[in-house]
Image (cartoon, grey):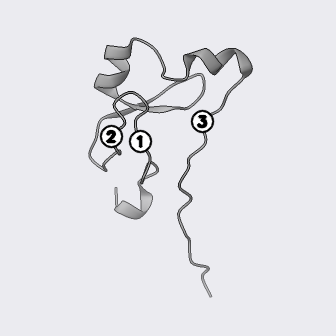
Amino acid sequence: MSNKDFRFTNEKCLVCNKTFEENDDIVVCPHCGTPHHRVCYKENTKCANHEKHSENFRWEPTFIPFVEEKK
């Protein structure tokens, strides 16, 4: 996977607050899509946004990559 394809660029794990890096082992909550480091998800035993699941919360990235238009 190249850097331009990394979908969690500049995003942080809500458990440890560390920015995701390309080679991190990342898991995504099946309910809301929130990304976590695998070890953080296991240690937390649930999604960091678990309390918002009843509100139909969906995680959205804060960073939107710039994509150049092809001519």
Q: Quadrant of residue 52?
A: top right
Check disc 3 and report its element: helix, strand or loop: loop
- Residue type of the residue flagged with mark 1: Lys
Tell me the crowding category of disc 3: few under 14, some 14 to 19, or many 20 or more residues within 10 angstroms, Cα based. Answer: some
Nearest to viewer (mark 1 / mark 3): 1
Q: Nearer the viewer, residue 11 or 28?
A: 11
Please tell me whether residue 1 is drawn above or below residue 41 in the rendered image: below
Q: Residue at x 33, y 40 (%)?
A: 18
Q: Position of residue 1 (x, y in %)?
A: 34, 55
Cα separation, mark 2 vs mark 1, equals 5 Å
Contact (Cβ within 8 Å) of mark 2 with mark 1:
yes
- Residue type of the residue flagged with mark 2: Lys
Cα separation, mark 3 vs mark 2, equals 17 Å
Q: Nearer the viewer, residue 56 or 70?
A: 56
Q: Position of residue 62 (x, y in %)?
A: 56, 50
Tell me the crowding category of disc 2: few under 14, some 14 to 19, or many 20 or more residues within 10 angstroms, Cα based. Answer: few
Q: Is residue 64 left or right of residue 19?
A: right
Give the labeled residue for mark 1. Answer: 12
Q: Position of residue 41 (x, y in %)?
A: 37, 21
Tell which residue pokes out farthest to the bottom in this image: 71
Give the labeled residue for mark 3. Answer: 59
Give the labeled residue for mark 2. Answer: 18
**Labels 3 and 2: the sequence-earlier one:** 2
Q: Residue at x 35, y 44 (%)?
A: 20
Q: Is residue 27 left or right of residue 32?
A: left
Q: Nearer the viewer, residue 1 or 17?
A: 17
Check disc 1 and report its element: helix, strand or loop: loop
Tell which residue pokes out farthest to the front in this image: 17
Q: Residue at x 44, y 32 (%)?
A: 14
